[in-house]
Image (cartoon, helix red, strand yellow):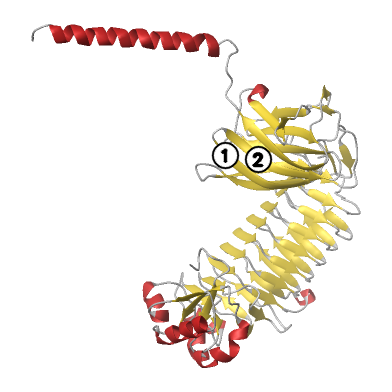
């Protein structure tokens, strides 16, 4: 029930001491002796799962709720003792997280209860540290030093708030991955009001993902490091969003980098990928090149409401992914889209402006006509595919059906809109353009353009004002002459064979054995 119902209320009716020693994740504590007076804290229409130590108090609590007209009440038989014996996880309110780390064995998983912990923690062994709730499990550095220091390989830290380490001028960090450690995962955390939010130096093989990093001097700083994934973070209201210093093979993707002074600062770094990020309203620069940068790939990003995008003139970086994949969306660049093709000299729109966007430090040869986005589609074989979209309109309600192969979506625009959908060929592919049928509210869309490369089919179409249902269907090609001549011949041949077979049966029956 807990895994499948995110709105389920888990109610612990033991006392505070029992709860602190171990409880189910995000369980709400209302001791049995307080329950009658605190019924107003619960919603009578919610599904409520109640547990205690062994089942006695939860039975009484269940009866109290039923007697007070609660509609969906469940009593967990055997209570927390049965839960624990089964090996299910539980969270502990530690007096000190550091003491729990010191007493843990290598590879142990430490589940930290919600609470406010004033500590400076050193993780000096391979551990998995998971907070109960990233908004309520709070580690506070009191403004006088690095909050979490990672001093080992194979460490994972998630679902916590790390805050108030102090000033970056003293090199204080929220989370610091010390030199020469690898396979460190920092995921799903709130990193708030620190000098440096997360820093990794001389590291290899780290994942920094799905963190909310805000109100810091530097959100993320990677120096002299390689093979780092910086993905799906929300980086807002910092001085520097992310700094890449003398680093290689860093993948910066699908991050929201909003309202910082500098969005991304990159210096002395090469062979990195900066893909599918939103740079929005950064006050000075979205991306600033500190020099000596080369072979960085920067494409499918959305640059919105920004002042400028400077790279030094001697930088040798790529600002697009070739044709027809395209480059970036620049909100301050407008052109015409009358042509298509690698040289933009073939008739028909394709979602790419007809002329390159020239800027200091490089040229985006194929600037996108609208914002870029990616949606995940689950296919019939449970495989997840990413479908890329370029559009000036709201896109929603993606769906996929296998028979016939059809991708559906809803588009909405206050005026006539356009959309370019990049469909992985492993999901849907066709040998020629005639095998694609594109409809708007059931009617064929005549204005469309279909391109392809080794990995994607790029389908561009226009649609009329309003909310529309679009379906992109792949059909098998059938020769024009094949259907009607072959069908009667097939039926006749089957009848002849059937008659011959019946005659054989009759003859066999008459002859003696």
The extreme left residue here reads 513
Q: Which mark is residue 408?
A: 2
Give the structural element (helix, strand or loop) at label 1.
strand
State whether residue 309 is above or below residue 220: above
In the rendering, at what x and y percent does residue 346 appear? 81, 23
The extreme bottom residue here reads 33
Q: Quadrant of residue 121?
A: bottom right
Q: Give the camera-side residue of 147 and 375.
A: 375
CA gap, disc 2 and disc 1: 8 Å
Does the CB distance between marks 2 and 1 fall below 8 Å? yes
Is residue 264 visible in this depiction of the protein?
Answer: yes
In the rendering, at what x and y percent does residue 281 appear? 86, 58
Q: Earlier in the sequence, mark 2 or mark 1?
A: 1
The answer to whether 359 appears left or right of 404 in the picture is right
Q: Which mark is residue 33?
A: none
State whether residue 11 is above or below residue 497: below
Q: How many marks?
A: 2
The residue located at (54%, 89%) in the rendering is 35
Is residue 226 visible in this depiction of the protein?
Answer: no
In the rendering, at what x and y percent does residue 348 appear? 81, 26
The residue that mark 1 highlights is 401
Give the structural element (helix, strand or loop) at label 2.
strand
- Quadrant of the image for the C terminus? top left
């Amino acid at each position: 029930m807990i895994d499948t119902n995110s709105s389920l209320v888990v109610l612990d009716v033991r006392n505070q001491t029992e709860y602190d020693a171990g409880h189910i994740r995000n369980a709400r504590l209302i001791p049995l002796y307080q329950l009658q007076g605190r019924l107003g804290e619960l919603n009578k229409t919610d599904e409520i799962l109640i547990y205690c130590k062994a089942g006695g108090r939860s039975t009484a609590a269940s009866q109290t709720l039923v007697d007070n007209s609660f509609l969906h009440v469940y009593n967990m038989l055997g209570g927390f003792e049965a839960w624990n014996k089964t090996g299910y996880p539980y969270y502990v309110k530690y007096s000190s997280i550091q003491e729990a780390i010191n007493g843990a064995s290598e590879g142990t998983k430490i589940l930290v209860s919600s609470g406010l912990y004033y500590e400076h923690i050193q993780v000096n062994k391979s551990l998995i540290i998971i907070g109960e709730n990233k908004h309520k499990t709070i580690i506070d550095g009191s403004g006088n030093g690095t909050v979490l220091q990672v001093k080992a390989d194979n460490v994972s830290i998630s679902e916590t708030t790390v805050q108030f380490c102090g000033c970056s001028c003293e090199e204080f960090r929220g989370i610091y991955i010390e030199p020469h450690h690898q396979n460190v995962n920092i995921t799903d955390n709130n990193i708030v009001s620190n000098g440096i939010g997360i820093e990794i130096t001389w590291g290899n093989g780290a994942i920094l993902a799905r963190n909310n990093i805000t109100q810091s001097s530097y959100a993320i700083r990677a120096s002299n490091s390689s093979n780092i994934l910086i993905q799906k973070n929300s980086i807002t209201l910092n001085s520097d969003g992310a700094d890449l210093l003398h680093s290689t093979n860093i993948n910066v993707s699908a991050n929201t980098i909003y309202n910082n002074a500098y969005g991304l600062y990159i210096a002395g770094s090469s062979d990195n990928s900066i893909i599918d990020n939103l740079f929005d309203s950064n006050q000075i620069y979205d991306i600033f090149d500190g020099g000596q940068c080369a072979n960085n790939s920067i494409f499918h990003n959305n640059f919105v409401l920004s002042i400028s995008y400077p790279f030094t003139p001697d930088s040798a970086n790529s600002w697009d992914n070739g044709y027809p994949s395209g480059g970036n969306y620049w909100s301050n660049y407008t052109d015409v889209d009358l042509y298509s093709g690698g040289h933009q000299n073939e008739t028909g729109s394709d979602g790419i402006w007809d002329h390159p966007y020239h800027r200091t430090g490089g040229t985006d040869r194929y600037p996108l006509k609208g914002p870029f986005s990616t949606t995940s589609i689950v296919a019939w074989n449970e495989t997840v595919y990413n479908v890329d979209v370029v559009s000036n309109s709201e896109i929603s309600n993606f769906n996929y059906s296998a028979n016939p192969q059809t991708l559906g979506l809803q588009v909405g625009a206050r005026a006539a809109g356009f959309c370019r959908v990049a469909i992985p060929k492993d999901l849907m592919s066709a040998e020629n353009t005639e095998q694609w049928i594109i409809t708007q509210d059931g009617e064929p869309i005549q204005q469309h353009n279909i391109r392809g490369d080794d990995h994607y089919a790029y389908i561009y179409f226009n649609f009329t004002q309003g909310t529309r249902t679009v379906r992109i269907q792949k059909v098998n090609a059938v020769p024009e002459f094949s259907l009607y001549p072959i069908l009667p011949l097939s039926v006749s041949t089957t009848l002849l064979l059937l008659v011959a077979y019946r005659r054989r049966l009759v003859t066999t029956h008459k002859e003696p054995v």
